[in-house]
Image (cartoon, rainbow, N blue to C red):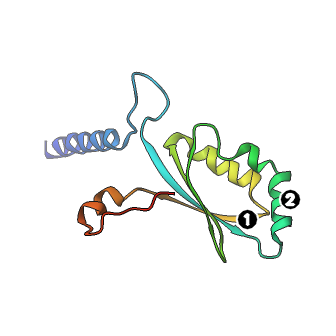
Amino acid sequence: MKNILFAALAMICITNFTYAQSPVKKGGDKEDTEKMLLTIFLKHDQSMNLSEIEEVRTKQGFYENFPPEGVSVVNWFVVMGIGQMVVLELPASKLRDVNLAIEKTAWKAFSSEMYPTYDLYPLMEKKLDNKSKVSY
């Protein structure tokens, strides 16, 4: 009897955990409605100069294929000595598309690192004495 109760409790917990982790869906729509941020570091291949990097990127179709459809650019910075840092906003379902776009069009010119991120500023703003924020 104890084993049956334990098994039932375990199934309820697993089911609730699965639903809690599932993306929010709208009325049968397959597209995720929750957005995530993804920070990508495109590190320059230092064996090439800027013109050579640009040539590789153009030849591989980077500008036509990045970011993929349904993905928005939040910020795009040059990080001197490293390369470029791109912050994207996307539905979780588009993560694969972003990864493929980088692999197909940025490799050779850059090595890449990707980090899921989130905007902590709305929480931090309440705690800061100086509430000013730069917007570009």
Q: Is there a contact, CB below 8 Å, between mark 2 and mark 1?
A: no
Mark 2, secondary structure of its residue: helix
Residue drawn at x 19%, y 46% is: 6
Residue nearest the viewer, comparing 67 with 130: 130
How many neighbours does mark 1 have within 10 angstroms: few (below 14), some (14-19), or many (20 or more)?
many
Q: Which residue is mark 2?
A: 55
Relative height, residue 5 to residue 85 (above, below): above
Residue drawn at x 13%, y 42% is: 1
Position of residue 55 in the picture relative to residue 125 (left or right):
right
Residue drawn at x 68%, y 47% is: 66
Tell me the CA gap for discs 2 and 1: 12 Å
* Corner quadrant of residue 9: top left
Position of residue 73 in the picture relative to residue 52 (left or right):
left
Mark 1, secondary structure of its residue: strand
How many neighbours does mark 2 have within 10 angstroms: few (below 14), some (14-19), or many (20 or more)?
few
* Corner quadrant of residue 82: bottom right
Relative height, residue 90 to residue 122 (above, below): above
The total of numbered circles placed on residues is 2
Q: Label 2 sits on what residue type?
A: Glu
Residue nearest the viewer, comparing 23 with 12: 23
Residue 110's spot in the image, x, y percent? Answer: 73, 65
Q: Label 1 sits on what residue type?
A: Phe
Residue 69's spot in the image, x, y percent? Answer: 63, 37
Residue 135 is marked as none
Q: Which callout, 2 or 1, points to the residue nearer the camera?
A: 2
Residue drawn at x 76%, y 50% is: 62
Q: Which residue is mark 1?
A: 110
Position of residue 96 in the picture relative to residue 47 (left or right):
left
Residue nearest the viewer, comparing 86 with 16: 86
